[in-house]
């Protein structure tokens, strides 16, 4: 069975209440539930994890190799703009991934417009709110099904 891992970075546990003008009103549990439901219908194993810890995200990316993860969807949140270590973890594992951002980072502060991950990512989904996760999942699904 193909496996997709969904990783949510810092402060995403506050979705639904945190700055809804940027991040919307959908909470993280709703995002994860929708992804799990879709994956179940598609016969795909999916696991969703959230942490506020950079080291935990790095560990999960590295561990994904031994867990035989085929594809990763990640919203690295603020670590997008600061973490060379997360970039290095993706480079080391070689697992294909899509980078997701709920808000349009290109319409926000200058520092949010740079990503340490985008050039390694298969693609990015930015500014489409919670729907961005669904679009990333659809791409990941096609990719893992075509790889089998």
Image (spheres, helix red, strand yellow):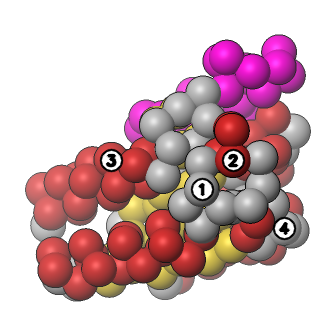
Residue under label 1: 25
Front label number (3 vs 1): 1
Residue under label 4: 52
First in sequence: mark 4 vs mark 2: 2
Q: Gap between marks 1 and 2, in whole Å? A: 5 Å
SS of the residue under disc 3:
helix
Give, as a single range, the part of the protein colored magenta.
105-124
Q: Residues within 10 Å of mark 1 (few under 14, many from 20)?
A: some
Residue 31 at x, y percent in the picture = 48, 67
Contact between marks 1 and 2 (CB within 8 A): the answer is yes
Residue under label 2: 20
Which residue is at 73% across, 33% downward? 116
Q: Gap between marks 4 and 3, in whole Å? A: 24 Å
SS of the residue under disc 1:
loop
Residue 142 at x, y percent in the picture = 18, 54
Residue 122 at x, y percent in the picture = 42, 38
Q: Is residue 147 visible?
A: no
First in sequence: mark 1 vs mark 2: 2
**Along the horizontal axis of the image, is 114 left or right of 16?**
right
Front label number (1 vs 4): 1
Q: Residues within 10 Å of mark 4 (few under 14, many from 20)?
A: some
First in sequence: mark 4 vs mark 3: 4
Contact between marks 4 and 3 (CB within 8 A): the answer is no
Which residue is at 52% across, 33% downward? 126
Q: Closer to the camera, 88 or 74?
A: 74
Q: In the rendered structure, find residue 135 and report the number of the disc placed on it.
A: 3
Q: Gap between marks 3 and 1, in whole Å? A: 18 Å
**Along the horizontal axis of the image, is 129 left or right of 22?**
left
Q: Residues within 10 Å of mark 3 (few under 14, many from 20)?
A: some
First in sequence: mark 2 vs mark 3: 2
Figure check: 24 above or below 47: above
């Amino acid at each position: 069975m193909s496996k997709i891992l969904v990783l949510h970075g810092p402060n995403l546990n506050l979705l639904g209440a945190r700055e809804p003008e940027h991040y919307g009103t959908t909470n993280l549990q709703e995002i994860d539930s929708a992804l799990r439901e879709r994956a179940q219908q598609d016969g795909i194993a999916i696991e969703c994890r959230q942490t506020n810890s950079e080291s935990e995200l790095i560990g999960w990316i590295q561990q994904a190799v031994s867990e035989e993860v085929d594809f990763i969807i990640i919203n690295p949140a603020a670590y997008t703009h600061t973490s060379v270590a997360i970039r290095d973890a993706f480079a080391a594992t070689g697992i294909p991934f899509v980078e997701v951002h709920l808000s349009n980072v290109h319409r926000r502060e200058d520092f949010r417009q740079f990503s340490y991950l985008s050039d390694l990512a298969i693609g990015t989904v930015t500014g489409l709110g919670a729907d961005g996760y669904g679009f990333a999942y659809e791409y990941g699904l096609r990719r893992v099904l075509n790889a089998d």
